[in-house]
Image (spheres, rainbow, N blue to C red):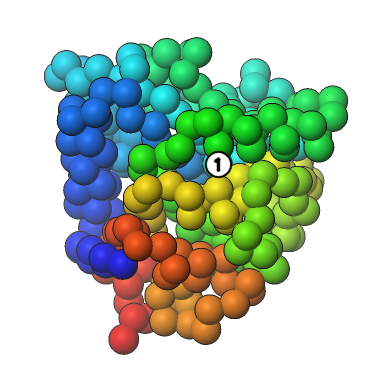
């Protein structure tokens, strides 16, 4: 595991962004695993600027980590909507190359199976990850087995509260989500995790120095051979 620590979020986002841009230049039909939340926004900005300078995403294939149960892709708080606004529309990813779990599927179990087959078909070359303050990756909350595949999960109250900043009220945050499992995340050839700010410092310390157990989903990354963790100084402040 490689750990990169810089003073500011902007620096780590630019480093991670350039690494992904280089990979797209080298392999225009690369498959990217994508995340939502604040952590990848600087990376998406970097890639949008690279696109304006000529980098094509036309042949890039994508697979997103997760989606809220009950929200349609057109719902402004859905992750699909977020990705359209923050990444797909700005980089020109072709709609036919976008992979996303449907939170509004009638039969959610079938939807998990469908998405899992998509993930098996399109092996990720790079998976981008943020980190929940409770150590979650995707929506794999503490307690999720490391060999889990796409599944429906009950969100912890702390997660709903943390994500309520995107909704009008905390009650509006869905209580369930559909998420790639930890095994799906570990299947990616390489993984880039970005964490910034003081409130992530505890989760960062647990991920890198804590006991490896299902109580710490991000600890599963320590068993993967190609992970780079990008941290700003504040998120790294509790590390030995
Ligand atoms: C959400 C997402 C995760 C994300 C995490 C951290 O719960 N499901 O994929 O990594 O929040 O979000 P942020 O980057 O906004 O701190």
Residue depicted at x 37% and y 48%? 189
Foreground residue, 178 or 196?
178
Task: Tell me, yes or no, if residue 164 can be seen here.
Answer: no
Q: Is residue 86 above or below residue 205?
A: above
Task: Tell me, yes or no, if residue 157 can be seen here.
Answer: yes
Give percent across and percent down for residue 25. Answer: 18, 28
**Residue 95 as seen in the image, left or right of residue 22:** right
Q: Is residue 96 above or below residue 233?
A: above
Q: Is residue 58 above or below residue 150?
A: above
Foreground residue, 101 or 70?
101
| Residue 140 figure quarter | bottom right
Furthest-front residue in this view: 121
Count of all numbered marks drawn on residues in the image: 1
Quarter occupied by the C terminus:
bottom left
Furthest-right residue in this view: 106
Indicate the secondary structure of the residue bearing disc 1.
loop
Give percent across and percent down for residue 20. Answer: 26, 38
Foreground residue, 22 or 54?
22
Residue depicted at x 49% and y 13%? 95
Give percent across and percent down for residue 154. Answer: 77, 53
**Residue 116 as seen in the image, left or right of residue 199:** right
Q: Is residue 4 above or below residue 82?
A: below
Q: Is mark 1 within 8 Å of ligand 1?
A: yes
Furthest-left residue in this view: 53
Quarter occupied by the N terminus:
bottom left
Query: Neighbour class for label 1 at 10 Å: few (<14), some, many (≥20)?
Result: many
Residue depicted at x 24% and y 53%? 12
Residue depicted at x 63% and y 60%? 147
Residue tagged 1 = 65
Give percent across and percent down for residue 41. Answer: 38, 39
| Residue 66 figure quarter | top right
């Amino acid at each position: 595991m490689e750990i990169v620590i810089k003073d500011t979020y902007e620096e780590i986002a630019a480093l991670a962004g350039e690494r992904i841009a280089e990979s797209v230049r080298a392999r225009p039909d690369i498959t990217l695993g994508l995340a939502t939340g604040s952590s990848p926004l600087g990376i998406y900005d970097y890639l949008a600027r690279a696109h304006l300078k000529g980098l094509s995403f036309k042949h890039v294939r994508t697979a997103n980590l997760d989606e809220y149960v009950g929200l349609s892709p057109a719902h402004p708080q859905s992750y699909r909507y977020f990705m359209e606004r923050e990444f797909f529309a700005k980089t020109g990813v072709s709609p036919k190359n976008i992979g996303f779990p449907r939170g509004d599927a009638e039969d959610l179990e079938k939807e998990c199976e469908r998405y899992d087959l998509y993930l098996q078909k399109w092996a990720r070359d790079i998976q981008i990850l943020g980190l929940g303050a409770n150590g979650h990756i995707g929506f794999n909350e503490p307690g999720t087995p490391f060999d889990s595949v796409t599944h429906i999960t009950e969100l912890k109250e702390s997660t709903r509260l943390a994500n309520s900043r995107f909704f009008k009220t905390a009650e509006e945050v869905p209580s369930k989500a559909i998420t790639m499992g930890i095994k799906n995340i570990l299947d990616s050839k390489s993984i880039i995790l970005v964490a910034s700010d003081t409130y992530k410092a505890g989760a960062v310390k647990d991920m890198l120095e804590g006991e490896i157990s299902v109580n710490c989903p991000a600890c599963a990354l320590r068993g993967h051979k190609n992970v780079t963790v990008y941290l700003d100084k504040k998120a790294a402040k509790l590390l030995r």
